[in-house]
Image (spheres, rainbow, N blue to C red):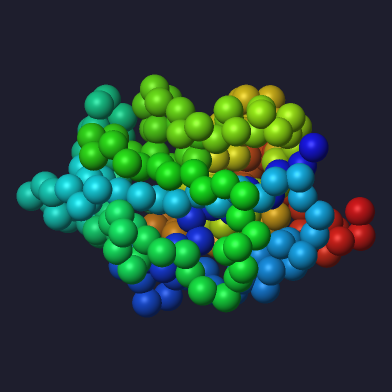
Amino acid sequence: MKALLLVDLQNDFFPGGTLPVPEGDQIIPTINALLDMDWDVIVASKDWHPANHKSFASEHEKDVGDIIKLQGVDQILWPDHCVQKSKGAEFYPGWDITLIDKIVFKGTDPLIDSYSAFFDDGHRRSTGLNEFLKEYQITDVYCAGLATDYCVRSTVLDALELGYKTFVVTDGIRGVDLSPNDSQKALDEMNRNGAIMITLHQLLNE
Ligand code: VGL
Ligand code: ZN
């Protein structure tokens, strides 16, 4: 059984948002083509932070990009983004959100971040995604969305660790690249850990 997992397709990660991923909008045609295919379930994650989330530089006397510790875990400080119920946290337009079977919310605990759609960054609390996929007897997970070097990376690594056959749709992702090679490094790491890199074209011809 196959799941499509769309990571953080929210306004703040697109051009015009508070934490825009370069070229993020270019993945939308791929997302639409993926949505046209047959899936047993379609899941979308939402970064869903309280306004006082500790990953926000505004909560500290620090700059965006500085690194601090949250509950023993290294944390990059970000601009305020994806605040619960804000416009920036809404899904980006241009794809059919009525096709989503399940929305998974993450980053809701103000004290720790959650790049992965499965667990917080301390691997302490589940978002419920694994339980949902198990309920539907999902074995294969196909991942697309934003951002390659943060939430896609962590989600894919967790999916692999949980034993899912995990695919990354390479033209359906884009990275932040705070350092120029971050996305490439993330792709290499996902690959090393067993992720299967696939283009939309390959998928359509499978
Ligand atoms: C993300 C940084 C902070 C992401 C979320 O969706 O990749 N990145 N919060
Ligand atoms: Zn976030």
| Residue occupying the far right of the picture | 205
Quadrant the N terminus occupies: top right
Q: For residue 144, which quarter of the picture? A: bottom right
Up-down relation of residue 121 to residue 167 (above or below): above
Residue 51 shows in the view: yes
Percent position (x, y) of residue 163? 68, 25
Query: Residue placed farthest to the top in the image?
Result: 124
Q: Residue at x 11, y 47 (%)?
A: 60
x%, y% of residue 61? 7, 50
Q: Is residue 9 left or right of residue 172?
A: left
User: Number of numbered discs present?
Assistant: 0
Image quarter where the C terminus lies is: bottom right
On screen, 38 above or below 36?
A: above
- Residue at the spot 48% in from the left edge and 69% down from the top edge: 92
- The residue shown at (33%, 68%) is 87
Q: Is residue 48 left or right of residue 29?
A: left
Q: 106 or 152, which lies in front? A: 106
Q: Position of residue 123 (x, y in %)?
A: 42, 25
Q: Residue at x 62, y 50 (%)?
A: 101
The answer to whether residue 65 is seen in the rendering is no
| Viewer-side residue, 199 vs 38 | 38
Q: Answer left or right for 13 relative to 129.
A: left
Please indicate whether residue 61 sits to the left or right of residue 198 in the image: left
